[in-house]
Image (cartoon, rainbow, N blue to C red):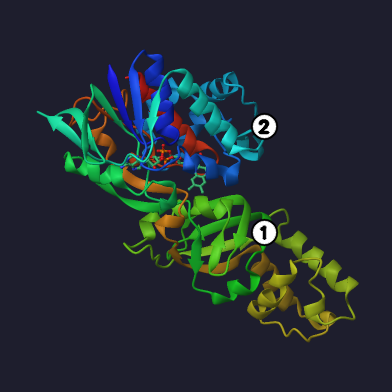
């Protein structure tokens, strides 16, 4: 069969390789002059290609339509991906949280291996080829229009990705193409993205990395909506870093059309290893050590430097006060502040900065066992163009690979 694939990203390449292995004549049409641009920048250039947790654990890490991905993830698992990429000569390693990377720490090794395998299997990649629409006849896909020219095929796979980091080529074309054929597009939203806070004082701490902290998001009814532990970053306008990116997904129900969030507070536990009593004892030991100093000069063992003026201000304790004059009540308030440092979430940052797009082609219109459209025969989907999304940790790329394999096989 003649197969046309739209998009040479993670999912399109995997679909192409799989389809060619089935003996098909495969051509991938890629809008930009390069394949896998997003794959190259993934994992900060190191490509966190999958996660080593048991495949059953994946579903807990997929807030966007996990059930739809059952067949895809079980028919091509994380172990299958690791074995596959190693069979192409790329050694892998597992890091904190089960994150799997190439041993070389180079995403280009993953991309080059996929491209080499595609070449070996005679998959053709046609660059600078922007697909504009899919041609159908009686609800059957028969071809497509690329750079104004019609090309016909037996089956077509749409693998155009989401709508974030537009410089990589994923500009949301797939949504328009699918919508024109009658598919429903669930409104794309930024996921895994930094957050801006109401408090402008964050800018004085910009660049600060907080390691081993716990975070909790609470709504206006003081109900916990998310919690996590790990590393985060303070930015000029708010917060970012791994645990914040994942937390951003939990804000979708609280977000308006312009990404603004109402009544959600973020609490950072700066000392999660210590309970209130232990932390107070620790503070008392520091105060004893610095007993002849002013309060502002007694916090260096406890907090990063750029955070000290901010904590002092919120604590309401006079910074000039001698440490041994700090009252018990003030000390207890300080403990509370360090255990739940409050910030008010203003908005999620724009979709262009998002690691992943939530939303996309409605899953109930796609056959989960084959990835074929339920509306248009011989049209298949894979990757981020579908309304699926996961947390950080390699889960999103595994979704792209697994859905790519399933579409390619079928
Ligand atoms: C900064 C960053 C870091 C990330 N890091 C990780 C990570 O470490 N681990 C992880 O699991 N996930 C990560 N992700 C997410 C992951 O990269 C994506 O989920 C994945 O690449 C999606 O694959 P895809 O094939 O669906 O889409 P893409 O990789 O976006 O590929 C889509 C392709 O389609 C092409 N295209 C679009 N429109 C057309 C058209 N009209 N005609 C022809 N071609 C077209 C595009 O040019 C592009 O090449 C990261 C994302 C970003 C932005």
Task: Decide which of 12, 386 is in the foreground and name it.
Answer: 12
Label number found at residue 230: none
Would you say the beta carbon of the disc 1 residue lies within 8 angstroms of ligand 1?
no
* Residue under the image location 37 percent in, 37 percent down: 30
Describe residue 295's horizontal placement relative to residue 189 as left or right.
right
For disc 1, the marked residue is 210
* Residue under the image location 43 percent in, 29 percent down: 13
For disc 2, the marked residue is 103
Mark 1 or mark 2: which comes first in sequence? 2
Q: SS for tag 2?
A: loop
Q: How many marks?
A: 2
Would you say the beta carbon of the disc 2 residue lies within 8 angstroms of ligand 1?
no
Q: Is residue 90 something one can see in this rendering?
A: yes
Disc 1 versus disc 2: distance between alpha carbons?
27 Å
Q: Residues within 10 Å of mark 2 (few under 14, many from 20)?
A: some
Q: Is residue 16 above or below residue 318?
A: above
Q: Is residue 184 something one can see in this rendering?
A: no
Task: Decide which of 76, 104 is in the foreground and name it.
Answer: 104
Task: Quadrant for the N terminus, please.
Answer: top left
- Residue 354 in picture, x, y percent from top left: 45, 53
């Amino acid at each position: 069969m003649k197969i046309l694939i739209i998009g040479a990203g993670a999912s399109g390449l995997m679909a192409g390789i799989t389809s060619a292995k089935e003996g098909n004549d495969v051509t991938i049409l890629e809008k930009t002059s390069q394949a896998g641009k997003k794959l190259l920048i993934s994992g900060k250039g190191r490509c966190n290609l999958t996660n080593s947790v048991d495949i059953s654990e994946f579903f807990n890490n997929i807030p966007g339509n996990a059930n739809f991905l059952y067949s895809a993830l079980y028919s091509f698992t994380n172990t299958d991906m690791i074995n596959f990429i190693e069979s192409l000569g790329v050694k892998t390693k597992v890091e904190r949280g089960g994150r799997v990377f190439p041993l070389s720490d180079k995403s280009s090794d993953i991309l080059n291996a996929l491209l080499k395998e595609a070449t070996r299997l005679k998959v053709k990649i046609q660059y600078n080829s922007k697909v504009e629409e899919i041609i159908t006849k009686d609800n059957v896909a028969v071809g497509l229009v690329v750079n104004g020219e019609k090309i016909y095929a037996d089956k077509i796979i749409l693998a155009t990705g989401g709508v974030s980091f537009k410089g990589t080529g994923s500009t949301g074309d797939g949504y328009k193409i699918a919508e024109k054929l009658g598919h429903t597009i669930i409104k794309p939203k930024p996921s895994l993205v930094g957050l801006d806070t109401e408090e402008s004082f964050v800018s004085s701490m910009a660049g600060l990395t907080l390691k081993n902290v716990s975070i909790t998001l609470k709504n206006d009814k003081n109900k916990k909506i998310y919690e996590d532990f790990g590393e985060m970053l303070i930015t000029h306008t708010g917060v970012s870093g791994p645990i914040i990116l994942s937390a951003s997904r939990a804000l979708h129900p609280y977000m308006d059309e312009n990404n603004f969030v109402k009544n959600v507070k973020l609490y950072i536990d700066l000392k999660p290893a210590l309970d209130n009593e232990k932390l107070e004892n620790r503070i008392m030991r520091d105060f004893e050590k610095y007993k002849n100093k002013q309060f502002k000069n007694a916090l260096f063992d406890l907090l990063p430097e750029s955070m000290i003026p901010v904590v002092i201000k919120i604590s309401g304790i006079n910074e000039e006060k001698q440490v041994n004059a700090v009252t018990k009540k003030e000390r207890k308030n300080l403990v509370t502040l360090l255990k739940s440092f409050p910030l008010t979430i203003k908005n999620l940052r724009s979709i262009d900065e998002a690691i992943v797009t939530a939303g996309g082609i409605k899953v109930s219109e796609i056959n989960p066992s084959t990835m074929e459209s339920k509306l248009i025969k011989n049209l298949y989907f894979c990757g981020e163009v579908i309304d699926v999304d996961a947390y950080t940790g390699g889960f999103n790329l595994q979704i792209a690979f697994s859905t790519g394999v399933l579409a390619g096989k079928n």
